Image (cartoon, rainbow, N blue to C red):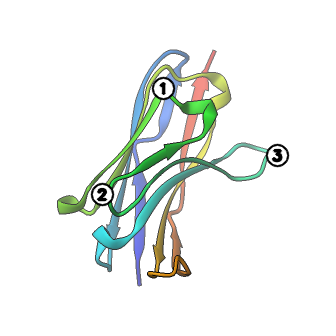
Amino acid sequence: QVQLVESGGGLVQAGGSLRLSCAASGTIFSIYAMGWYRQAPGKQRELVAHITSGGSTNYADSVKGRFTISRDNAKNTVYLQMNSLKPEDTAVYYCNAKLLDDDAVLRANYWGQGTQVTVSS
């Protein structure tokens, strides 16, 4: 059973920074594509940033240039560095792990419990 545990959320003023961490256990972390999603009240969950097992990244347009996703396979951890935070970044942030086979078929999909990020104006 794969477990994902997020940490690092909190309350920050607009313009501030936070770093989220997601520690994985119970699997070979390096083979998973990892992502950060967020869900604000009354809105659908959306992809914020994604990093493949090979280290390629992509970001939602709303966070490009402000957020950076990275991974440390030796520590089984993925990070989301969030700078220049805005009130509209307020949401519960979820860590996600996906395992795709060679045909890009989804073979496993796991979620963390979420961590609250609140940005005050």
Which mark identifies residue 53? none
Name the residue at 58% across, 26% down.
Answer: 119
Q: Tell me if residue 9 comes above or below residue 75 in the rendering.
A: above
Residue type beneath disc 1: Gly
Residue reaching furthest right?
A: 42
Which label sits in the foreground, 3 or 1? 1
Residue corresponding to mark 2: 77
Residue type beneath disc 2: Thr
The C terminus: image quadrant: top right
Name the residue at 49% across, 56% down.
Answer: 35
Rounded to the nearest angstrom, the CA distance separating label 3 from label 2 is 29 Å
Name the residue at 82% across, 46% down.
Answer: 42
Residue reaching furthest left?
A: 74
Specify few, some or many for label 1: CA neighbours under 10 Å numbering under 14, 14-19, or 20 or more: few
Is 114 on the left or on the right of 91, as rendered?
Answer: left
Residue corresponding to mark 1: 65
Image location of residue 14, percent across then percent down: 55, 17
Q: Disc 2, disc 1: CB below 8 Å?
A: no
Which mark identifies residue 42? 3
Under circle 2, the secondary element is strand
Image location of residue 26, percent across then percent down: 32, 79
Specify few, some or many for label 2: CA neighbours under 10 Å numbering under 14, 14-19, or 20 or more: many
Mark positioned earlier in the residue sequence (3 or 1): 3
Q: Nearer the viewer, residue 26 or 8?
A: 26
Residue type beneath disc 3: Gly
Q: Disc 3, disc 1: CB below 8 Å?
A: no
Mark positioned earlier in the residue sequence (2 or 1): 1
Q: Tell me if residue 11 comes above or below residue 106 in the rendering.
A: above
